[in-house]
Amino acid sequence: MKRRLVSLIVLIAAFIGLTLTACDKPNIEDSTTEDTQIVETSTELNSEATEPEIEPEQILRVNWGSDPPDLDPQTTTDQLSMWILNAVMEGLVRLNPDGTIGIGLAERYTISDDNLTYTFYLRDAFWSDGTQITSHDFRNAWIRAINPATKSNYAYQFFYIEGAREFNHEEENDISTIGIRSLDDKTLEVTLNNPTPYFLSLTSFVTYMPAQKQAVDFYDQEYGESTDKMVFSGPYIIEEWIRNEKLVLKKNEMYHDADSVRLDNIYGYMIKENDTILRMYENNELDFINLPTEFISKYLYSNEFKSLSEATTWYLMFNCENKYFSNYKMRLAFALATDAEAYVNVIAQNSGTVAEGLTPPSMTGKGHSFAVDRYSVLPGYDPDKALILFDEALEEVGATREEFKNDVTILSEKGDTWNRRAQFLQSQWKENLGIELFIEQLTFSERLNRYDTKSYEIAYAGWGGDYNDPLTFMDMLVTDGGHNYTHWSNKEYDEFILKAVNSAGYERIDALTVAEAIIAQEIPVYPIYHPNKNLVIKPYVRSLAIFPIGSDYDFKWTYIDK
């Protein structure tokens, strides 16, 4: 089969086309009178007139880094699982390589004149076991995520839908009050509380993807734990999964757009040692890798090196229910004792920017970067003041330095990159606070579990945006929020977040700037930096879509051209 030569990487614009207004609906000519097709659009860079023969063996080799912690679309929260789920599942829409809304399991959709009712018309599509994908699969999956018994950390992503918040908060127990209705096997109607410009794009997000009801009912809590306990709707299926070794994807022949899928397999390995990762890339055993920062200088001028902005923030995270870090002075002391600029220079190798707030500058505000609207200022680096506050905090909580050292560890993950991060923090606090804390290294899934169960004191963590709006960063810190691993609670903060959810235009941006100012003052997290995504990729890897927001990669269009 011949295809046009496309770019090595299709780079998605930072604003990713998610900030659409009510009068700027893509693919909608007249939502009140006509059904409208979802049209596929894409950007092809460095295209050539020649059409090379595609390599007969279409195999991409990647490094997953570890086992995915959770492959249940309605309960997963981590980046790696979403990376894989985006390959094996599909929502009502799928983002094109240029970030615009493309074709998914919905063949077409309409939006009501008041922008509150979305009606999706499903195409003839099938699960990987050959059964029909229906609107009921979507409705059941979404309600399952909303159901408080599921304990989905992403349940709040459905709170834009009528009745979802009330049902999740157990203020209402009648499922029929939720604005998700299957009108027939092929038609899904969704009613929102308020116009939500990015709702259509949200339906491409992992939590909004369908799950086959028969499989979920049969496997129950074990759904998604192994390849034989899942059914797939996306471009690939999971062919093989050997824990701690590899996870292999295979082209899904039942996929509705299978003709666009060129790879036969994706071989994914689970390697943590940076030297091994680089060696395998250089020996042509891996086709692209996220480049560890210590090797950036080696590849800085190579045409295989790519450095792309990310809508991500890394931060110190404090357990605000812990004896020590429930104390404001203690949190402030550790923030003031951490030199974010030195971190960016030394650990990140200048690949990224020092954070000025929790929200990255790529998030949209009042027609420009949200950073322009921000008025709050982070505490900054002041080791002298940090030491004074540390001693005062110890006195207030009634503990000695020795007791603090015995009780507090730095929660980290296994692997070379995590070692460098944790050791930097350890050295900063030893130098500036006179306390050397033990570094506790866990697996990825163990670390997430410790966050969730409040079994940590201080950690270094990161959050990537799910859609292009500051709310995707700030709503995670609401009281009892599914991703509020700080376990911090502030009534005023919650009120401003709710105001942002229920308002529009500049009013909601003003509410979000106040909310971020509360974070800067209270410091449940202390933002350190916004990274770049650094990778090296073989020149024969074509059409790998890379997103700064949501799922990192999409392999649907990728192919090998040697």
Image: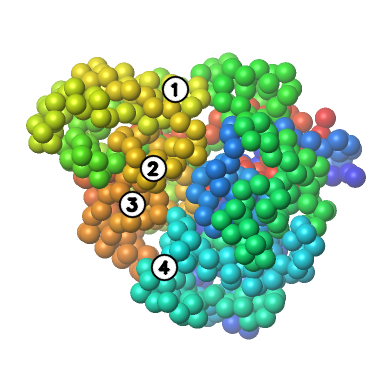
Foreground tag (1 vs 3): 1
Q: Earlier in the sequence, mark 4 or mark 1?
A: 4
On the image, numbered disc 2 is attached to which residue?
451
| Callout 1: SS | helix
Residue 307 relative to residue 136: left or right? left
Q: Tell me which amino acid carries mark 4.
A: Asn
| Callout 4: SS | helix
For the residues marked 4 and 3, what is the alpha-carbon distance in whole angstroms? 17 Å
Q: Are marks 2 and 4 in contact (CB under 8 Å)?
A: no
Q: Are marks 1 and 3 in contact (CB under 8 Å)?
A: no
Residue 389: x and y in percent read 13, 30
| Callout 3: SS | helix
On the image, numbered disc 3 is attached to which residue?
477
Residue 500: x and y in percent read 34, 63
Q: Badge 4: few (under 14), some or many (20 or more) residues near its Cα, within 10 Å? A: many
On the image, numbered disc 4 is attached to which residue?
168
Q: Earlier in the sequence, mark 2 or mark 4?
A: 4
Q: Are marks 4 and 1 in contact (CB under 8 Å)?
A: no
Foreground tag (2 vs 1): 2
On the image, numbered disc 1 is attached to which residue?
419
Question: Height in image: 411 above or below 149?
Answer: above
**In the rendered image, is residue 460 in sight?**
yes
Foreground tag (4 vs 3): 4
